[in-house]
Amino acid sequence: MRWFGQLRRLVVSREGGGTVLMAACTAVALGVVPSILEQWTSRQWVFAVVFVGALALVLVGWVLQRPRGLGVVVSLYPADRTQASRVVALKNASRRAHSAVLVVDRAVLWPGERSVPGCLDVVDFVARLIDAQIEELRAAAGAEPDVALYVLAHLQDGFLLGRRLADDAQLSLAVMHLSQQTGRSVVPGVELGGSLRAALSDHQRGQLSRHLATPASGRPQLVEIPDAAGQQRHRIALIVRLASAGSMIDDARHVAATGQVTRGPGHHTGYRLSPPGPAHANGPCGAYLVIDTGNAYLPDDSALYAAVTTYIWECWQAARQEWAQRLGDTIAVEGLLFFHGPLPIAAALGWLTARDRLTLVHHDLRLAQGTTSPPAASS
């Protein structure tokens, strides 16, 4: 019987079960069962226990059926690089935690596309889908939904998505994290909000000192690169290593100091700079600074992720101001971000620097391993 099956699915669902529980227990609290109990006993404490228990179950029913926000699963890997099992893990986590789920899978939407990270049109399309779903939930519920992003993407795409989402401010927007340390479990990453711009507390700085190689001054030194041909003096390189990658610092420092993505004929750093042309010029940067965990992974701690994000943002702001003063404020300072670390932090940095001239440099592991040829546009 079709209607019976639909009713059964409704009753056993979280929302339907919560509604039934609220209705039944409200009737108990309002007197249906107490009237029956009068036929059995006159002890007042029995009525009090039944009343309190019924009210507690009404609250439990409300918790079960209340809206639990929107979970957005975003896979920005093209079809030739998709990771289906990880996408499934994110989908399952989102469905368990949220009332509404939106899945945006680049490999499904554009199945014939080759691996091209950093596509602004794709990122903008994803952001528009998210905004449309939020508007629909807002209209239906009459309230702002909590939104959690379950993102699987290249670091550059995550950075660009965070930057694009800064244009559509939400009251609650969190980026979740597929943990590398505890199997395929999904843990909180970074919540995107004004608190990321707040000054770090002493407790947060204590956390950072246990994981980052922070100098006594509290911020890494801005190292000036000697003058060289074709140097882009207005650019500074922000080199951030928050996960295990042995040669990452040396490779990024080499690219920043020379403008070249190769270190001899047998070693490609894996970095892809913008193609040279009228709007782009690749050469040595004017200076660089390094933020490093010492080739170690950060623990899965959302509070630590938030503190690290704020610290990187503070270092970028201070370095940009310092370099602008050295140049005499005659030209806008730009930044190249060489980043290796958790995706939620990359997305949060994109969100924080949405109005800044900061570009995350894409790193292609296949180039670094010599398993693919450098693109023609690479320098």
Image (cartoon, rainbow, N blue to C red):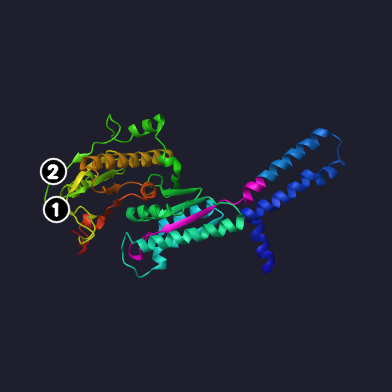
Q: Residue at x 12, y 53 (%)?
A: 264
- Foreground residue among 373 and 307: 307
Magenta region includes residue 62:
yes
Residue 346, horizontal then vertical, whole percent? 35, 48
Residue type at mark 2 is: Pro
User: What is the spatial separation of the Cα atoms under label 1 and label 2, in whole angstroms?
Assistant: 12 Å
Q: Which mark is residue 226?
A: 2
- Foreground residue among 25 and 110: 110
Residue 72, horizontal then vertical, whole percent? 48, 56
In the rendered image, the quadrant that contains the C terminus is bottom left
Q: Which mark is residue 293?
A: none
Is residue 189 something that shows in the picture? no
Pointer 1 local density, CA inside 10 Å: few below 14, some 14–19, many at least 20 = few
Q: Residue at x 43, y 61 (%)?
A: 126
Residue 197, horizontal then vertical, whole percent? 41, 40
Q: Residue at x 25, y 43 (%)?
A: 324
The image quarter containing residue 85 is bottom left
Residue type at mark 1 is: Gly
Magenta region includes residue 221:
no
Q: Residue at x 61, y 55 (%)?
A: 141
The image quarter containing residue 215 is top left
Circle 1 sits on which residue? 230
Q: Secondary structure at mark 2?
A: loop
The residue segment tinted magenta is 60-83
Left or right: 340, with 252 as reference point: right
Left or right: 21, with 47 as reference point: left
Pointer 2 local density, CA inside 10 Å: few below 14, some 14–19, many at least 20 = few
